[in-house]
Every structure is written in structure tokens, then in C-alpha cells.
Amino acid sequence: MSISDSEIRDLSKDEIIEKYHQIKLSRDRVFAVTSHDLRSPFSGLLGISEMLSKNVSSFSPEDLQEYISTIHESLQNTYNLIENLFEWGRIERNKLEKTIELIPLKLILEEILNNLGTFFTDKDIELEHDYDEQQIVSANSRMLEFVLKNFLTNAVKYSARGSSVSICCIKNGSNDEIQVIDRGVGISSENQSKLFKPEFSWKRHGTEGEAGTGLGLLASSRFAEYFNAEIRVSSAEAEGSTFSLILPAPLS
């Protein structure tokens, strides 16, 4: 949440103080995540790799496969965290061009799902589609991909094995609203209010112990706001969640 010189001139003293307070909270949150959630996986990886390097011949193929799977999962989680930190940094420093494009929704979703690889199949999650395959949306492609990838990753993380996740696109007035719907553990109303606020560090593990920092949703919220889009959440504990990205109507 950076502030340009022109924005500063339009703010009152109290508004400037509040803006900089929010900036400090955001930076404190990033430093906290970096120092703990980024360092912790490497400690585990170093331990496993050291053990394997010294005793690899003593492990059965099954044990080796388990260790390799653990390494892969840890690296994937770490990569996602670094990606979230990188994008957040670009937003905070106003390093993104505010370009808006006309994007075929089907194509960008296919690209996202290809990048997620076996994320759905590994947990036996069925992906359902409910949108016009000819749907064109107006958005920044980088923002759209980043936000929807976080939505889908969280939907799988907090869903039970063998359940389903849905992607919908509906009209919300003159805007397009893309929804990712899961039937998972849900979020209480109290915790929903903490999701997009840097002063709170709310996080929870997935249904199979998957790591979570909460940073992805916070960065997604900043990203969407930067491009005049909006994120909304509707959820109840044990009933699943709907995360919505509302895209502004194209300028005529």
C-alpha cells in the first residue's frame, strides 16, 4: 500500500497517518512471514536431504518415495509463498502497469490449471465449470491469474478428499463476477473479517495438514484493489466458502 506524491497532497493529516500505519502493518506482516514461514521449510528440507545424503542406500524404495514426496510438497509450498511475496512487493512499490485487456476466461483458467499440475488429482478433487466457454472478461491478466490461482489453491486445500470445487462466472450489474466455490471446512464470520487485514495473522492448515500463511489472500486483495477490482467472501463453518472476484465493467 504505497502512496504517490499526488495522493499525499489530497489527504488530510489524519488520513496520511492512517495510510502510513497501514503500510507499516503490511511490512511487519511480510517480515513476520518471511522470517518464520519461509525459513521453516528450509530447516526441514535440510534435515531430510542430509539424512538421505548420508544413508540413501539404507532406505527402501517406499521410504525414498515418501521422502521425495515430502520434499516436493515443501518446495511447492515455498515456491507459492515466494511468488506471493514477490507480487506483493511489486504492488506495494507501484511497479505494475495498470493495463486492462479483454481476456477469454476459458483460456486463462486452462493456463492456471496447467500450472497447478496435479494439485486437484492428488487430492481427488473434482473441478466443475459453470460459465459460458465464450466468456470474455475485462481485467489485467497477471492479476486475474494470480487471484484465481490463490482462490483455487485454497479451495482444494480446505476441501475434503473426494469432494468438488466449482468455478462460475455471473453478471453482477454491469460487472463480471468470477466465483470459486468449495464445500470444505468454511470460515467463521469472525475470521472472515481478518482475511484481508494486515494487522491480523490468521492462518490454518488444510484438511490434510497442508501449510497456510494467509498471505496469498492478502496479496490477492491488494492486487485486485490495484486494478479497481474487488474480492468478496461468503462462508460458514463446515459449509464451504465462495470467494468472488468482481471485475469492473470495461470503459466505453
Image: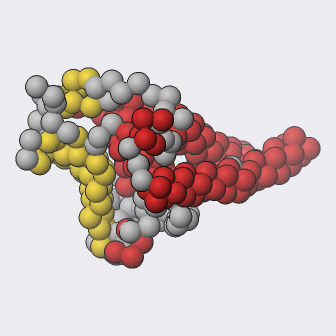
Furthest residue toward right: 54
167 vs 99, nearest the viewer: 99
> In the figure, residue 50 lies in which quadrant?
top right
Q: How many marks?
A: 0
Q: Does 240 sit left or right of 115 as displayed?
A: left
Figure check: 103 above or below 54: above
Nearer the observer, 1 or 60: 1
**Looking at the image, which residue is at 26% across and 64% down?**
234
Name the spot of residue 73 as percent of width and height, x first: 60, 47
- Residue 182 in view in this figure: yes
Residue 6, x across and y down, in percent: 42, 35
Front residue of 246/199: it is 199
**Picture residue at 30% right of the left edge, 34% below the top:** 109
Q: Is residue 189 above or below residue 134?
A: below
Is residue 220 visible in this depiction of the protein?
Answer: no
Residue 141 is situated, as x and y percent measured from the top left of the image, at 34, 28
Counting from the top left corner in percent of width and height, residue 136 is at 16, 28
The residue depicted at 37 percent of the width and 35 percent of the height is 143
Seen at 59% across and 54% down, the residue is 24
Looking at the picture, does residue 105 appear above or below residue 161?
above
Does 82 sit left or right of 237 as displayed?
right
Quadrant location, the C terminus: top left
Is 15 on the left or on the right of 38, as rendered?
left
In this view, the residue in front, 66 or 153, is 153
Q: Is residue 156 left or right of residue 64?
A: left
Q: How was this image coloured?
A: secondary structure
